[in-house]
Amino acid sequence: MAANEQMQNCACPDCKCEVSPATAVDRNGKKYCSQTCADGHADGSIGCGHTGCACGKAA
Ligand SMILES: [Zn+2]
Ligand SMILES: [Zn+2]
């Protein structure tokens, strides 16, 4: 009955992960699946710790 806790996609452009608003990393009002995504992969890291996710990889 928690309709306001709908899963949503990570705000990282290439990330396909779904995050729960309750547990997501909040950055500037956007929800991210991980700290790495929230930082925009500023350190050049690829992926966010989730299997099969390669967000942040240079195009
Ligand atoms: Zn991800
Ligand atoms: Zn990411």
Image (tube, rainbow, N blue to C red):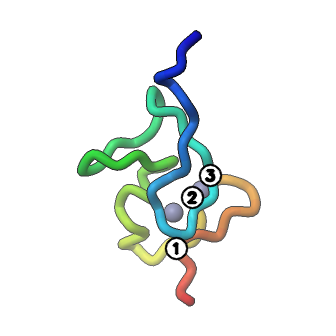
Task: Name which residue lies at 50% across and 25% down.
Answer: 5
Q: Are marks 1 and 2 in contact (CB under 8 Å)?
A: yes
Q: Which residue is mark 3?
A: 17
Q: Quadrant of residue 8?
A: top right
Mark 3 and ligand 1: say if the CB distance to the nearest ligand atom is below 8 Å: yes
- 41 horizontally vs 16: left or right: left
Q: Which residue is mark 2?
A: 48
Task: Name which residue lies at 52% across and 73% down.
Answer: 56
Sequence-first disc among 3 and 1: 3
Depth order, front residue of 8/28: 8
Task: Give neighbour class at mark 2: few <14, some 14-19, many 20+ (Cα, 10 Å).
Answer: many
Mark 1 and ligand 2: say if the CB distance to the nearest ligand atom is below 8 Å: yes
Kindly identify the amino acid type of the residue bearing the numbered disc 1: Gly
Most extreme residue toward the bottom, as rendered? 59
Q: Which residue is mark 1?
A: 56
Task: Name which residue lies at 27% across and 45% down.
Answer: 29
Helix or strand or loop: what does disc 3 sit on?
Answer: loop
